[in-house]
Amino acid sequence: MIPTIILAVCVMLALAGVFAVLLGWANVRWHVHVPEQLQHLMDAMPGANCGGCGYIGCSEYAEAIFHEGAAPDKCSVGGAAVAERIAEIMGVEHVAGVPSRPVVLCGADFDERLKRPEYRGEPTCAAAVMVAGVQGCTFGCLGLGDCVEVCKFDAIHIINGLAVVDYEKCVGCGACVRACPRNIIQMVPFHADAMAVVACSNLDPGKVVRGVCTVGCIGCGICAKLDDIFTIADNNASIDYDRYQADTDLSAAIEKCPRKIIRMEGK
Amino acid sequence: MTVADTIKIPGKRSFARGIHPSDKKSLCAGSPVEILPTPKSVLIPLSQHIGAPCAAIVKPRTEIAIGDVVGDSEAFVSAPVHASVGGTTSAATVTTLPNGQHVGAIPITVAEEQPLASQGLWDDIYGGNWPTDSIESLDPKQITQAVRTGGIVGMGGATFPTHVKFARNPDKPIDTLIINGCECEPYLTSDHRLMLEAPEPIIAGALLSARAAGAERIIVAIEDNKPDAIEKMQSAATGTGIDIVGVHTLYPMGGEKQLIVAVMAREVPTGGLPLDVGVVVVNVATAAAVARAVLRNKPLTHRIISVTGEGVATPKNILAPVGTSYADIIEHCGGLTDSADRVISGGPMMGFALGDLDVPVTKGTSGIVVLTEAQTRKSAETACVRCGRCVSACPLGLVPTRIALAARNKDWEMAKRYYITACVECGCCAYVCPAEIPLVQLIRAGKAGLPRD
């Protein structure tokens, strides 16, 4: 009589053998042909599946490049290196672009924002934004971290009630831009390591802004007088990033801004 | 109830599910409407309705009289706003209304001499005679136009422009007008007081509204916790052919869809309007405003507000001009008590908690309710135990827990499959939830977060 344990091992081995043959045969029989070029593209992807390129994941982007000729520079995680590799595989010329990074268009931390009653509702920005008077400023950061939750790279944090981007970690996938219910995170082409930003989105008249924030833009226009890269619209200053160059120096405007709301963001 | 009554009013006076919150109306149901002394300044929001906001048509630093147009819009779904006091305008500013609308607003510094104040104001708005014999000869289009010009919107709180409800659609004829005097929100008594103190303009407004919308039958529905109002309205309606019906006291009876089921036994389809089942519903205060706009040619400038709750020193019903700040009104009622914790614009079920009292009253402000710390205290939220209480409370027959948790997890497919957009946000589910899950709040935020497609 064969001991039970030996019998069991033999049965398992036999089964393994049968399935190995079956699987091997199935692999040959139903083989999916992946073109070599597409395989190389997939291998070149960083595999973060963040969706920053606008496709569902890395492999879909690879297929879009292969089948539809999508642009090689859409992967924000891989940056220039991946774009060059893709261009090389596809045999197209790659012109190095400028990476985009998010900037938070609110510069007031918890203590700088006025009229902040206690909020006891659902602790998400999407819920708080529906409560009138959750804070005085109806444009500014709510500080409950919907952007932090969607960031796969741990690159945005709430520091004293204000979302702050960690540019060392940020890859520019844009998930935070889509998550913000107040639409105050904007993608900006980073021509330099650090860019000047008017960190305020408030479109109300200056008098109203003064009542709700100690730093918000009041649309005084001093920056626009110093440099025509600034434009004032709806009581709010903004920078024309199409004209921003790597050597653009806006330190005079930063210095003169009475609210100190033009700030350098970046590394 | 006789057989003849049943044929006339087929509804069972009630609807399925719903809740019975403590109504707390005794706090100020007995206090007659007090006329607020004219405030020193008012702030007229340029959008006090659902629809396109108005553009300001007055210049800063100009003299303006009560009833003058302050802002208007070309859009169909919109209503003009008027000066509620005489005075001098200042430069336009912005304000955030309790419902979250961030809108432009015109400040008016009130002149010392007001042509209408105290009893004279009351007589001009609700007092005097309301002749109803000439209504049959009026052109429906003229009535609708006068309602538009008068800036009348639904005063029950939803602020939908009333003239839009009256615009006739040949494909969807209206047979019944329901005048909504339910006031199912706890605490609020403004409609109750109006029915007691000024039933005549409501009746006149009901006849005018029916004429404008083409309704043959008029039913005034009042919750049966207000027998005195039912009696008063019945005697005012004698000889007009208007039926006064007492419906069960059940929240949210004042919701259009629930009221139509209770009175007419008709079900408004999901995503549909009362129009689809041949009904128009108009609040009692709106009806009175319609009468004033058409018969007296005066726009909507004032409204009755219940200032109530355990957190306010002396609860009162106040007649206040639109644009008065909440702070001024609360001040007039003796201010907040020490235990006051939360100020709500509207009723406690569907109203909005305020972060700042320096906001103006609008045409839709039916009440200011101040709750105490003991009332707003909540225990920590726990997991859903699938008890199904929210399901047995939801007047629309939805599954609130499924929708709310799907919305929290941003599972929009699931939320849509369970009809998130059908929710009317009455709050019954959150009221009954033993796990303290903020169901209605999650659903509300979820609706805003639904991806557009």
Image (cartoon, rainbow, N blue to C red):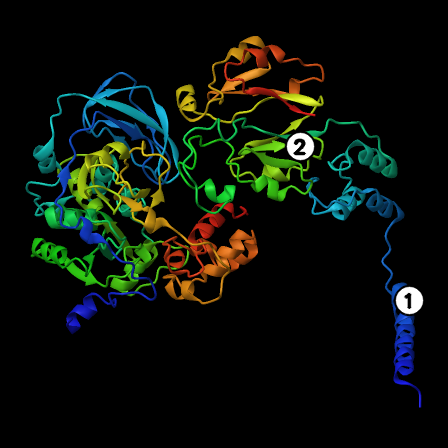
Q: Residue furthest front?
A: B338
Q: Chain of mark 1?
A: A
Q: Chain of mark 2?
A: A
Q: Which mark is residue A24?
A: 1
- Residue B56, image x and y in percent? 32, 25
Indicate the quadrant where residue B225 lies.
bottom left
Q: Residue furthest bottom?
A: A1
Residue at coordinates 65% horizontally, 17% vertically from top-left?
Answer: A243
* Residue A141 in sight: yes
- Residue B405, image x and y in percent? 51, 56
Left or right, B408 with reference to A1: left
**Dots 2 and 1: beta carbons under 8 Å?**
no
Residue at coordinates 89% horizontally, 66% vertically from top-left?
Answer: A29
Same chain for the residues under marks 2 and 1 in the image: yes
- Pair 2/1: label in front: 2
Check disc 2 and give the amino acid type. Answer: Asp
Q: In the rendered image of this protein, does residue A161 appear above or below residue B441?
A: above
**Residue position for label 2:** A166
Left or right, B59 with reference to A141: left
Number of numbered discs visible in the structure rendering: 2
Q: Quadrant of the N terminus of chain A?
A: bottom right
How far is mark 2 from mark 1, CA to CA? 48 Å
What SS does tag 2 mark?
A: loop
